[in-house]
Structure formats: C-alpha cells, structure tokens
Amino acid sequence: MPEISIIVPVYKVEAYLDRCVNSILNQTFKDFELILVDDGSPDRCPQMCDEWAEKDDRIKVIHKENGGLSSARNAGLKIALGNFIGFVDSDDWIASDMYEYLLDIISKSNADIAMCGYTRKDSELDEIGIKDQIKVLTNDDLWRFFYRVDGEESNYAVWTRLYKIETLRNVSFLEGKINEDVLFTYDVYKNIKKLVVSNAKKYFYYSNASGITKSKLSNKDLALLDIWNEIVSREHDYVNWAKLNRMRATYTLYTKNFLYGHTDSISKKELKNWKSELRQNFSQLINNEFLDWRRKVILILEIILPIK
C-alpha cells in the first residue's frame, strides 16, 4: 500500500502536463501512487496519461466524462489507497522535496494536516535546511486561521497540503461550482484537531494572466455567496467570524466588477444590492483586519463611485 496518494485532475493542459508529472515522479519521497484523472480532456492529455502509466507502475489513470475539477478530484479520492492524500493541479509543479517535507512536519507535530507555502515565481522555492516558520494550530487558533481573522491571505487551496486519510472520511468536493475548496476545507476542519502550517514554499502555482481571477464578473462567481451562506447556516461556535466572511464575499464579488466589469448575466439590480450591503456593513469591514489598507481604499472608492 502506498504511503501517499497524489491526485491530479487533467483537462486541457497538454503544454504543462509533462512538467507536472515529472516534478511528482522526481520526489525525494518515493512511496506514493500518482492518480491522473483525465476529465474528458479533448486534446492529447488522455493519451499522455496512458503513456505515463506505461513508464511508471506507480501511476494510475482514470478516464471519465468531463465533470469539472471537483468531480475529477472526487473520482481520484474514490480509488486512493494511501495513508495520506495530496492534490496537485496539472498546470502546476512542485519542489522535489515537497512531500518528504510535508510528511516530516506532519509526523513531528502529530498533526492531521500539513500545509506549506507556494509561489508564482519560477525560481523562488525553499529547500529543507532553511529555517522555516512552522506553526501548530489547534482549537480557536485553527478556526482563526480558517476565517482569516488576523488578515491572512486566502488559505483554502488543497494543493499545498498533505492530509491524513482519516480527515477525508465522508468529505467530498462540491461539484458544479467554483470556490469548491472553501467548503471542502471547512468540512475537513470539522474532522481534525491539529494543523501544522509552514511558510516554506514548495509549490509552483502557474499564474495564467487571462485566468479566472482577472476575468469579468459572471454568474458562476456567485457560488462564493452560496458557499459562505452555507457555512453561516452550519456554524455555531464561530458564527460571527463566519458572518464577517460572508460580508467579505460580497466585497470580493463587487470588487471584481469594480476592477474588471461584468457579463450580461449580472444585473444592475444585483450590483445595487451588493453596494447597499457594503454600505450597511462598511464600519465592520473597514475596522477589521480582514482587509489590508489597499483593499480598504478600494472599499471606500466603491462606496463613493457610481456602479460600473
């Protein structure tokens, strides 16, 4: 049985797949299985996955109809045999010691999940031996981190983490919506007692200049509100933090419109409602660590300037 199962959803990444797979196969920690999930990719990716499986018997391939990122990850989870689970996106790549490093800190701290840092720069990774800042989070500190109470950057991405398999029991990715990592992480945190977080950068995130973060606001972005509404409805112990994050979700969507505009699927009425909500919650947002000074300036401009 492999110690780690690494799940890689594959869709229209012909130019990047070899780089991703090579970085995984070249890991200093060797006891893993690599699950490539071809999510109905229309290019050469299905063939490339099969070719990789012929070269290395640690590789398994799933071919399925296109269902999206969450569907592909769920398919991989169903057949994973490892004691630990990792996720890598197929246009990204990882440091050669990433899983050795994560396994080391999760074992030393007896944590349920280990998390490292990432970079968008091609030559900015850390190696074992550099003094890292490592924090072990439990109880309130764990949830402060999840709700980003102290102004942390978004920390919901699953691809910088190593999970004990027990933490994923009865947990799956929400299919058919973006921002699926947020609710997945919430559900997983309900299963754990300890998270170890390192600032060591071990993951290369491919930043696509024409990607989703810089596109116009569209109907699919509204999933962010649905997800935070769901979390608020479930939360008891930290409901005030959950509500603040729901407020920030409105700010995030309105800011995307403010910076990049919107598609025809977003009505002016909806934008007016969000602006009204921002005005209503202005004091809570502006006086909170949630937003850094740049985002607070944007918030003020959003309140003052007319809707785009």
Image: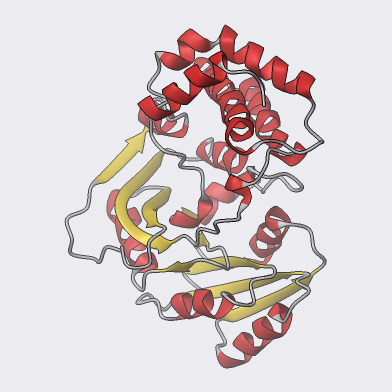
Front residue of 182/170: it is 182
Q: Is residue 67 left or right of residue 247?
A: right
Q: Is residue 171 left or right of residue 197?
A: right
Residue ID at (47%, 60%): 205
x and y, in percent, of residue 73 in the image: 65, 59
Residue ID at (64%, 71%): 13
Q: Is residue 162 visible in this depiction of the protein?
A: no
Residue ID at (55%, 15%): 303
Front residue of 215/187: it is 215
Front residue of 202/55: it is 202
Residue ID at (71%, 15%): 273
Q: Residue furthest bottom?
A: 55
* Count of numbered circles on the image: 0
Residue 204, compared with residue 269, is above or below; it is below
x and y, in percent, of residue 174 in the image: 70, 45
Front residue of 268/48: it is 268
Q: Is residue 275 visible in this depiction of the protein?
A: yes
x and y, in percent, of residue 280 in the image: 58, 7
Quadrant where the image shows the C terminus: top right
x and y, in percent, of residue 138 in the image: 36, 34
Say which quarter of the image contains residue 204.
Answer: bottom left
Q: How was the colour assigned to the protein in this rendering?
A: secondary structure
Say which quarter of the image contains residue 265.
Answer: top right
Residue 200, compared with residue 96, is above or below; it is above
Residue 99, compared with residue 193, is above or below; it is below
